[in-house]
Image: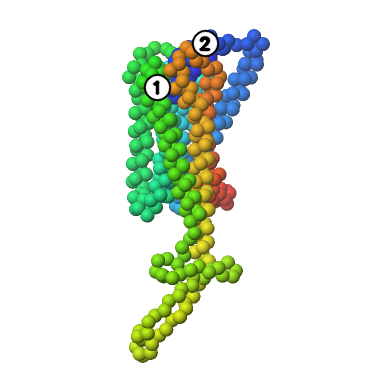
């Protein structure tokens, strides 16, 4: 059995040809063993694909049916789920057959559609993480002004820019394809002899977004931490000499020293002197402050986990995609490793919805309500 690099996104023709010489089937492996391995691999990849479909469908349905989640920020998350769903529907099923058989049997036209879908959708999934982080950054650092501009229309514009950039990265390879539609092909790969395109595509789809994500997350972390550590001001600017006094049973008192000069009087003409006024502040104010701080920590933690998962899943693939065309004959990766890196990248489309449902409290609560509602209905 021969193997070659069939990475759907930025597959490298040179490494694919080279792998033919190094992957001969071991003599100790009989046909029954190979068949068992193929079946096991097919089941594993099918489970991953099905789980990715279900997880993203649940996120989309949860956002659609939960009015509380109808916010511009969650529209971006919903768009990410749609993009990851497209990866699991348009890309991963065909990739299973290609990974297991190591032969392309679907013709040139479907090859072009599959490659363009893979490059576009995977890039869009990555870029969605950037706009989500950017939205979060603006919401924290410029809360008052950005609240006015944080609309559904602005979210739609950000999503449109993501897809435009993704398409601009996926289109160029098809201008120099020499294989004609009626010709039979044994493998479906993107010809990356153009080093300029390889650098452009990998930087546009991964390296630049990764740098942007790291910068944004660093600033988000610093801004969120400063807001969490900042002591709450409960009395507001109306009072000039207010100080917070801790009360019993979790209460708080805002003591105001105010002296009014003699001469002010009511209709009766009697002078009024106010020496000391105590205003008891409701516990709910402090409680809202604590809840807000907890949400800031939770949201920042969730974004950090998403960033870590993204780098873990996609870094090996894009290092390979950039290094192999540049060093050419001096470098070689085992084809099984190439397949593993490709599917590790696809796995990110499963991890994203899992993280949001597991670590985002609003999504978790909404999802639980939907589950309970279905149980009661049945």
Image quarter (top left, top right, bottom left or bottom right) of the N terminus: top right
Q: CA distance from mark 1 to mark 2?
A: 23 Å
Residue sitting nearer the eye, 5 or 258: 258
Looking at the picture, does residue 348 appear above or below residue 266? above
Q: Position of residue 100 (x, y in %)?
A: 55, 20
The answer to which quarter of the image holds residue 134 is top left
Looking at the picture, does residue 230 appear above or below residue 312? below
Give the residue at mark 1. 198
Residue sitting nearer the eye, 296 or 125: 296
Q: Are marks 1 and 2 in contact (CB under 8 Å)?
A: no
Which residue appears at 40% of the width and 28% of the height? 203
Label count reads: 2
Q: Residue furthest right?
A: 28
- Judged left or right of residue 54, residue 163 is left
Which residue appears at 46% of the width and 31% of the height? 87
Looking at the picture, does residue 334 appear above or below residue 316? above
The reply to whether residue 61 is in sight is no
Q: Earlier in the sequence, mark 1 or mark 2?
A: 2
Q: Is disc 2 surrounded by few (<14), some (14 to 19) or many (20+) residues within 10 Å? A: some
Residue sitting nearer the eye, 130 or 117: 130
At mark 1, the secondary structure is: helix
Mark 1 or mark 2, which is nearer to you? 1
Q: Position of residue 180 (x, y in %)?
A: 36, 14
Give the residue at mark 2. 20
Q: Position of residue 309 (x, y in %)?
A: 52, 35
Which residue appears at 49% of the width and 30% of the height? 314
Residue sitting nearer the eye, 215 or 242: 242
Which residue appears at 52% of the width and 45% of the height? 301
At mark 2, the secondary structure is: loop
The reply to whether residue 155 is in sight is yes
Q: Is disc 1 surrounded by few (<14), some (14 to 19) or many (20+) residues within 10 Å? A: many
């Amino acid at each position: 059995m021969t193997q070659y690099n069939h990475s759907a996104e930025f597959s490298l023709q040179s490494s694919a040809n080279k792998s033919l010489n190094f992957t001969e089937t071991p003599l100790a492996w009989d046909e029954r063993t190979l068949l068992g391995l193929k079946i096991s691999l097919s089941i594993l990849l099918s489970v991953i694909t099905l789980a990715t479909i279900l997880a993203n469908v649940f996120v989309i349905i949860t956002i659609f049916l939960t009015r509380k989640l109808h916010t511009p920020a969650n529209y971006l998350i919903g768009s990410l789920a749609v993009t990851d769903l497209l990866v699991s529907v348009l890309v991963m099923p065909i990739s299973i057959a290609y990974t297991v058989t190591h032969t392309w049997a679907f013709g040139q036209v479907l090859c072009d559609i599959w490659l363009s879908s893979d490059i576009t959708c995977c890039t869009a999934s990555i870029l969605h993480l950037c706009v989500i982080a950017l939205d979060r950054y603006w919401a924290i650092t410029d809360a008052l002004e950005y609240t006015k501009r944080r609309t559904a229309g602005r979210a739609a514009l950000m999503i449109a820019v993501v897809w435009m950039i993704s398409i601009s990265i996926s289109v160029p390879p098809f201008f120099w394809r020499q294989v004609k539609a009626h010709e039979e092909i044994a493998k479906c790969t993107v010809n990356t002899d153009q080093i300029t395109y390889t650098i452009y595509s990998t930087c546009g789809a991964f390296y630049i977004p990764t740098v942007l994500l790291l910068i944004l997350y660093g600033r988000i972390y610093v801004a969120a931490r400063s807001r969490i550590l900042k002591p709450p001001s409960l009395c507001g600017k109306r009072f000039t000499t207010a100080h917070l006094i801790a009360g019993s049973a979790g209460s708080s008192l805002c003591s105001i020293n105010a002296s009014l000069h003699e001469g002010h009087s009511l209709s009766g003409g009697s002078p009024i002197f106010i020496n000391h006024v105590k205003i008891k502040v409701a516990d709910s104010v402090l409680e809202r402050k604590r809840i807000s701080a907890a949400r800031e920590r939770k949201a920042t933690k969730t974004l950090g986990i998403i960033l870590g998962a993204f780098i873990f899943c996609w870094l090996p693939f894009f290092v390979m995609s950039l290094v192999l065309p540049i060093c050419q004959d001096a470098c070689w990766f085992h084809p099984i490793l190439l397949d593993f890196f490709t599917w590790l990248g696809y796995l990110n489309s499963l991890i994203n919805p899992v993280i949001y449902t597991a670590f985002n409290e609003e999504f978790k609560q909404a999802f639980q309500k939907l589950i309970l509602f279905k149980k009661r209905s049945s």
